Image (cartoon, rainbow, N blue to C red):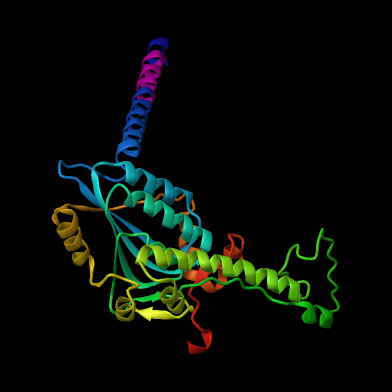
Amino acid sequence: MSYETDMILDRRRLKRHLTFWRIVGVLAVIAAVITAFGRFDLGGDEGQIARLSVDGIIVNDRLREEKLDRISKDENIKALILAINSPGGTFTGGENLYHSIRKVATKKPVVALLGGTAASAAYMVAIAADHVIAGNGTITGSIGVILQTANFTKLMDKVGIKSVIVKSGPMKAQPNPMEPFSEGARAVTVSVIKDFFDMFVEMVMDRRKMDKEIAYKLADGRIYSGRQAKANRLVDAIGREADALKWLNEVHEIPTELPIVDVQINYKDEKWREFFGNSLGKALFSERLRLDGVLSLWQPDSSLD
């Protein structure tokens, strides 16, 4: 092959490489623009309504809080609909989400739309909204907190295992499955649980405009149907999304024809989150939840299954 032929082939290869990298560069720029400006797919002169789904076990979620912060600042978003379908989760997870929603509510109206279940920490999240709508068959309420542990000491004795624990004080690492739950430790734990419980009930009293006596009477841990919740003023209305849009229009003059945009949160571990959240169920979440603190979670009696 001649020298000139080699030069021609080299130039062709170089052109192909340059074309490839130019295409890659253009696609990268397009992707960056979409990422920066198109996450909500917002647009239009009249604005839009954001819809955030709160599903499964509620835990601390920094990405969701950041998204809510963006919603609060986005003037194109005229209102927020919370579509809640959750048995609850950790107290801190529910509390942080509650405060993030209240921040949005200072800028624009928020409606909570309760699905099949909105109990415990999920009810805490719901009352952060300005208006709460449930279905007749919604399971809600379950106002309270729980801390679960176990005592393996008798089992350890049977198999010949002795736990050796060195700690700075008798209340450190209590409750602990590897040692008896002392009366002193129980008293301390009960006082902490009561404090969490009081915080939850104070939220209910504030957001639902209830007297202390009534709020504590309703907060005995029981669940309520949507109809019962409405009768006890735990929710504002029975209805569906159309009723949420009607309320936004009548109270805040937001047009019902505005497009509703689902808020997307892109987790890097999305497949694992879905697997653990849906496939295994909340029964296997005890360790993950315990790491995040006290629970506010509706747990139906397994003997009823």
Instruction: Name, please, the residue furthest toward the bottom.
Output: 304
Q: Residue at x 28, y 79 (%)?
A: 136
Asked whether the viewer can see residue 55, the reply is no
Locate residue 241: give its quadrant: bottom left
- 17 in relation to 122, above or below: above
Q: Is 185 in the magenta?
A: no
Q: Is residue 9 magenta?
A: yes
Please tell me which residue lies in front, 265 or 203. Answer: 203
| Most frequent secondary structure within the magenta stretch | helix
Query: Residue 181, percent across and down?
Result: 74, 75
Instruction: Tell me the quadrant of the picture where the N terminus can be found.
Output: top left
Image coords of residue 102 (percent x, y): 37, 53
Q: Residue at x 34, y 78 (%)?
A: 232
- Examine the rendered structure and indicate whether residue 162 appears above or below residue 73: below
User: Where does the image place residue 194, in percent across and percent down from the top left?
Assistant: 58, 70
Instruction: Confirm whether residue 58 shows in the render.
Output: yes
Q: Which is more toward the observer, 65 or 202?
A: 202
Left or right: residue 201 versus residue 255 is right
105 vs 258, left or right, is: right
Q: Start and end of the magenta stretch?
A: 6-17
| Residue appearing at x 48%, y 53% in the figure | 61
Percent x, y of residue 56: 44, 66
Q: How many marks?
A: 0
258 left or right, relative to 126: left
